[in-house]
Structure formats: structure tokens, C-alpha cells
Amino acid sequence: MSDFLSELGAFLADPDAWLGGAGLLVRTRDHVLLSLFAIGVAALIALPPAVWLGHRRRGGVVVGALVNVGRAIPSFGILALMLPISLALGLGIGFWPTFVALVALAMPPIFTNTYTGVVEVDPAVTEAARGMGMTGRQLVRRTELPLAMPVIWTALRVSAVQVVATATLGAVVGWGGLGRYVIDGFAQGNDVYVFIGGVSVALLAIATDLAFSFGERFVLPKGTHHRDRGELTSSAAV
Amino acid sequence: MTAGSADAMIRLVDVTKTYPGSERPAVGGLSLEVGRGEFVTLVGPSGCGKTTILKMINRIIEPTSGEIWVGGVEATEQPAHELRRSIGYVIQQIGLFPHRTIGQNIATVPELLGWDKQRMRARVEEMAELVGLDRSYLDRYPSELSGGQQQRVGVARALAADPPVLLMDEPFGAVDPIVRSRLQTEFLALQAELKKTVVFVTHDIDEAIRMGDRVALLNIGGVLEQFDTPDRILSHPANDFVAGFLGDDRGIKRLSLIRLDSLELPQGPVVDVSDDPAVANRAMDENEWDWVAVLDGKRLLGWVWRHELEGVERVGDAEPHPFRVTVDCRASLREALDAIVNTRNNVGVVLSGDEYRGMLTVDFLTRELH
Amino acid sequence: MIFAQTQPFIRWDWIVDHLDEIWERTVEHSVLTGFAVVIGLVVSTALSMIALRFRRTYGPITWTAGILYTIPSIALFAFLVPFTGLSLLTAEIGLVSYTLLILIRNIVAGIDGVPAAVIESARGMGYTDRRLFWRVQVPLALPVIVAGVRIAAVTVVGLVTVTSLIGQGGYGAFILRGLRRTFATEILVGTVMSVVFAVLIDLVLLWLQRRLAPWQRRQARAS
């Protein structure tokens, strides 16, 4: 145990461990960038159809089924599946399988929760807006979207945390990021690496959660007081 | 400690309830006695503590000071849950157990008391019949019943173990007025049969007057302003507060206390179909009216104008006009007043089924009140 | 999605050959899941009782459970490994931590969701506190609680695949091996079995949830 602690101390004291080419900072940066990219793409793909379908109140049954099935799908499995597919497509290991898996896993919860958020906007409000002569598109932009924002933002928050988590596993398919510490550590029997990997990912996940919570202030329209963190449907956890 | 007057089933002696952090007591030094078999209503504005008082009797709320005697035993002398098993309790939202069938709900207290299954089953069926609920409902769940039916189950459940005392907190408040009136009528009939000691809380003065043998009018802070029979309170309100709470139509409210079949009703100008017009004219002259009511034996046919009888041999030859508004003899003077006001001839005709009983005028009503 | 490969994507013969291993892994996966859910339920129930009795602890308790939920399971495992090794204990600590938030939330919500009128009328009829808890509050809360167990169980099934990285078994073993050999069939078996298993558990618990609340299925008709 004391060996472990002293090795840990040595690691943390070593500036190269932090600033080197394969150091903490670089890996954290890579991890954050890929996660942001993946969530951005997932949101870009999933949000518009979710908002539109929610507005039109179509496809509820599908959404319901997706919720339950989505939760049952293991991220690890999807990530692993991407490797042979990526290789077959000639895209290699590392970045592509990880990226595609992240996007694929982030889309369903963003989609289902956005849909629910739009559907659950107070019908009295939408009816009043329609009565005042708003077109469908105006209704979406001015009424449904702003009012569904708390739910949508929470969905993004939850998804972001999961993307950060799954990105950690990217190391298993040859990617870098903070997961590298964990996977290399397991392979080499290096407890310090494993520990550092675990702690930094944990901190990053918490930081992501906090960042989104903080961001509420800027993103949520005034007056949509965010009451509770609620139970959102999520895809498989990691 | 004495139990007090022999007849008193419930005695509150200088009972006070002050909530922590409050300056004024919710109920301050109240003393009240309810006799065995008596139906007492507690009524008053919000904040008068009527519900608090009720809940102190079965210790759902514990009093800050004072004594509460139920059936000769001081309430704190036994564990609360035992006291409650001998008191029936009905609240406004009823609180039926959603996860138990109606039958199981009704059997709640008997089960607590350890009755055997057969006895419980028999009692449950008896209770269902008592409150007018079809036996087929016993195996259903509360969510399958309407509001009025659920209320009946609430009453059945409270009476199942045959408690001598019944506490009711706005039990009919959550249903619509038509159902409420029916439930009140049915409960009064039940009480006539069972003669329980009942304490009934309501915010509705009309309900309090209709239901109670005696009415306790409470002011804010549990101050007992008047505690008397409905008739005496209406005719002699103790102070301005009481008068104000009773409302401007005190006199008319008093009318609702008197049933028509308890009075000797004036007959008014009536003739039989076989009579000749002269009899009719005499009757009309006596009453100084231009019309007369026509009977066939005991059955009321309607009325005719004086001039319609000119030239006929018998009264029955003229076509009688039916009375548009009549009153049943079991109704009160108040309904009679409503009929009088609604007819052209300004009379309230009283019937028992088809049978003619009498005819009321405003004069008669006024005389009855004094 | 058939690629230009010399081999077909799915090797059915491999699956047939390894049926007994699939069964073995199923047992492993069940054990890992079962332990986690049961222990999670026990711990969550205890914490919920505390939270219900001392309301002010609800906030801190759920905040802590929330943190544990936010931390990715792989991170939690990695954090523990230097201390508890590549063991079942490490896996279970991680898995149980994940279930706490959802279970505590549902247990508290279930108990709180019992209508106040039902509690008051039960007390008024002479129910003792203990009888009230076991005969009224618990039965009425059970459907909500089981709904929480469903979500927790399904989530855990997915997480158990990750435990293969710390040397535990279950379907994750297929995924990991399949990865190492770039053998798609094996990865697919691990993934699909995990999904099937989760869906089965979900359906069984759903059935249980419905059975525990026979009164909910029937609605009032106009009298």
C-alpha cells in the first residue's frame, strides 16, 4: 500500500506526467474534444427530428419502445462492434470506431428525451399560441422549444456525461484519451496508472455535469425554473 | 376523576390546543358535552378550530391541555389506537385503501379487533345493505366506484365495528349538491335507526341545521358562541356573530326545519266534482278568492275559475286546470314557500302522492313561525 | 451490411459450438447482476428509511448517490482496483453504487406517494404506526419501487459487461475476447445476449410490477 502511495506521489510530482506528449493534460484535452464533438454531432442529428415529431405528436409508440430498449444496450458492446466494422470499412482503429460508437449511443436518449420534453409542454400554452395565430414553425420556435429547453438541456447533460464515460472505453479499441491510463494500467499491472485514470475520468464526468448545470443559467429562458433533476431515460450506462 | 353527567357520551373539559410557534391558541379552553345518541354539528368560519376539536376527540391531534372524556373514559388513559377502534371516523377525502377491495375496506376495524372471518363477512354484507350499496361492489376496488359510492363505503367502514361514537369531518363536502342532499337524507334515516352519538363538522350552516339535534356555533379560536337546537339558534341568535353567520335569511331557514306532515294544514277552498256550483261559490266567498280547487274524492284534479262554473250543473262538468307546482307533504315549509312564490295563485298545494292534504298561504307560514 | 470479406460477418457455427460457454456466461452475468441489485436494494432501503425519518438527510443522501451515479463505472472500478484488486468485490462496489440513486429516489417517492387521506383514515381507525407502515404504505409503494428496480436491473446488466475489463465474467468476456481477436461474431454474441437478458429481466419485473398493483388496472365507470 505504501508502495502504491509513494509511486503515486512520484507520478504526480513528475512534470512530464502532466505536460508530456502522453501526459494528463494532453489526454484530458483529447478526451474533452472528442466528447464535445460527439455530443455535438449527436445533438445535431437527433434534435431536429425529435423536436419536429414532438411538435406533430407523432411516433410516440416508437419512442416508448426506444426508451426501454435503449437502456438495455451495453455501451461496451456497441463500441466493440464498431471495431470490426471500422476495419472492414478501412477506417482503422482508434478514432473512428470510438467516435461513431459515441454518436450512436448518444443519439437515442437525446432523441427520446427531447421528444418527451416537447410533447409535455403545457397544452394550454400551445393552444393559446395557436389561437393567437402562430404558424407551426413559429409555435415551435417561440413556444415549444423554449418551454422544452429544461428537459432538452438535462438530456444533453446526461448524455454528455455518458459520452465522457464511454470515451474512456475508447482505449480498448485503440483510441487515446484518459481511458489509456486505465487500459494500459491493467495491461501493465500499473496500479498508479489505473488509479490516475479512474480519478481523472471521475473528475471529468463530475465537471461535465457541473458545467452543464452551470450553463442552465444562460441557456434556459427566464421563467422556466428548473424544478427537479427528474428521471430522464438514458441509454446504457457506462 | 368523575365521568361527569351520566348521559354525556363525549365531554370536553377546558380543552386547549396551541400549535408550537403560534401566539394564539387554535382552540382556547373549550368545554362541551355531547349526550348519548345525540347528533351534534360543529360549524363556524375557517379558523374556528372545528376540525381540530373533532380530531382531538380521537387524538389524531393531541390537546395541549384539558380533558377529553369518551364513554366515561379519559382519552389519554388508553393507547390512542385502542381508543380509535371504538370510534368511527369519516373524513372528507374518505381515504379508502386503494389496494384493498370494498369488502376488505369495510372490514378494516373488525379485522383489527380480531373478529372471525364468518362474522366479518356477514357484517360487511350487512353494512353494504345499510348504506345502500349493491353486494356486487364488495369485490371491486375503490378506483372503480363513483364519488358518491365511495362516500357510502366510508360511512359503512366507520360503522362496521358498531362503535357508539361517530366522528365526521365534512364527509359530504366532496360531492356535488344533488348527491350531497341525498347522502344527508340517507344518513339521517340511518341515524334514526342506529342512534349513534355523532359529532359532525361542516362549514355549511344549512347542513349543520339540517343534520344536527344541536348545533355548536364556533368562532375563531374555538370560542363557543352558541350551542343549542337549530330552531332556538335561528329564532334567538345569542349575538351578532351568530346572527351574521346564520345569514340574512334566518327566518326562511327556520321554515326548513318544519315538515309539512307535522302540521295541521288549512284546507282552503276545495269542492268535490259532485258538488254544485253554489257550494263552490260559497267556498270562494269565504276565502275572498276567484277560484276553487277541485277534488275527486281524495284525489286532486286541479282548479277552476269562478266564471267557468257559470251555467254548469256540477263542478265536475268544468275542465279543471292542473296545478303547475305542488309540494310533497314530507317536504318542509321552506319548499312550500318556494311553491307559493312560484305560482300565479300564490298558494302551495300539499299532496301525499295524488292525495290532497291542504293548501298553504304566506299568511299561514308567517303565523307558523311565531 | 455485408462487407467485402472472405468470411461472412456472423459465424453461426461458432455460436453453436460455444453454447455451453454461453450458458456459463449467462450464469456469471446473472450472479453479478443479482448480487448488485439485491445489495443495492438493501442499502437503498436502509438509506431511504433514514431519509424518510430524518427529512433533512434526503438532500445529502441523494447528492452523494448522484455523484456516484455520475462517475462512470469504469472510473469507479479503476479507482478501486489498487485497493480491492481485480475482484468480485471491486465489481460489486461499483455496480451497487450505480443503483443507489434510482432506487433511493423510487423508494422515497413510493412511500411519499401514498395519499395523506389514506394514512389519516388508517390512523383514525386505530392502525398502529407499524401496522400502517407494513399493511398500507409498503403495499401501496411497491409498484413504484419495483419500477425503480426494473430500471436499476437493466442498467446493471449493461454495466456488468464492463466488469470483464477487471477480470470478471459475464457476457462482457465475449466482447473482450472478440475485440482482442477482432472476431465480430463473438462481440455480437456478447452484446446481443446482454440486450436479450436485460429485456427479459425487464419483462419479468414488469409483470411483477403489474401483479403487485391489481387495483390500478381497473378504473371507475360512471355509476
Image (cartoon, grey):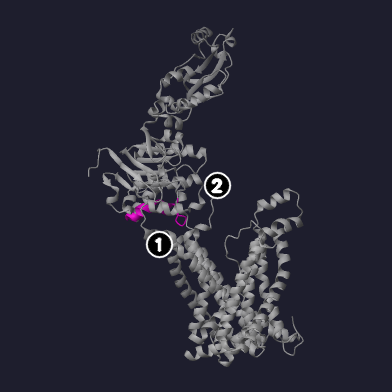
The residue at the point 35 percent across, 53 percent down is C126
The residue at the point 28 percent across, 39 percent down is B8
Task: Rate crowding at label 2 as few (under 14), some (14 to 19) or many (20 or more) other CA atoms within 10 Å.
Answer: few
Of marks 1 and 2, the one in the foreground: 1
C-alpha distance separating marks 1 and 2: 33 Å
Image side of residue A16 versus residue C35, left or right: right
Residue at label 1?
A: C134
Picture layout, residue B89 above or below residue B328 = below
- Report which quarter residue C119 is drawn in: bottom left
- Mark 1 on the same chain as mark 2: yes
Amino acid tagged 2:
Ala
Q: Position of residue B232 (x, y in %)?
A: 38, 27
B335 or B7, nearer to the observer: B7
Image quarter in which the C terminus of chain B is found = top left
Picture layout, residue B364 above or below residue B331 = above
C72 or B355, nearer to the observer: C72
| Element type where label 1 sits in the image | helix
| Element type where label 2 sits in the image | loop
Amino acid tagged 1:
Trp
Residue at label 2?
A: C222
Q: Chain of mark 2?
A: C
Q: Position of residue A19 (x, y in %)?
A: 64, 86
> What range of the chain is rendered magenta?
B95-116
Residue A216 painted magenta: no
Picture layout, residue B5 above or below residue B76 = above
Q: Looking at the image, can residue B233 be seen? A: yes
Residue B105 painted magenta: yes
A77 or A164, nearer to the observer: A164
* Among the two numbered marks 1 and 2 on one chain, the one whose residue lies closer to the N terminus: 1
Q: Chain of mark 1?
A: C
Q: Position of residue A153 (x, y in %)?
A: 65, 65
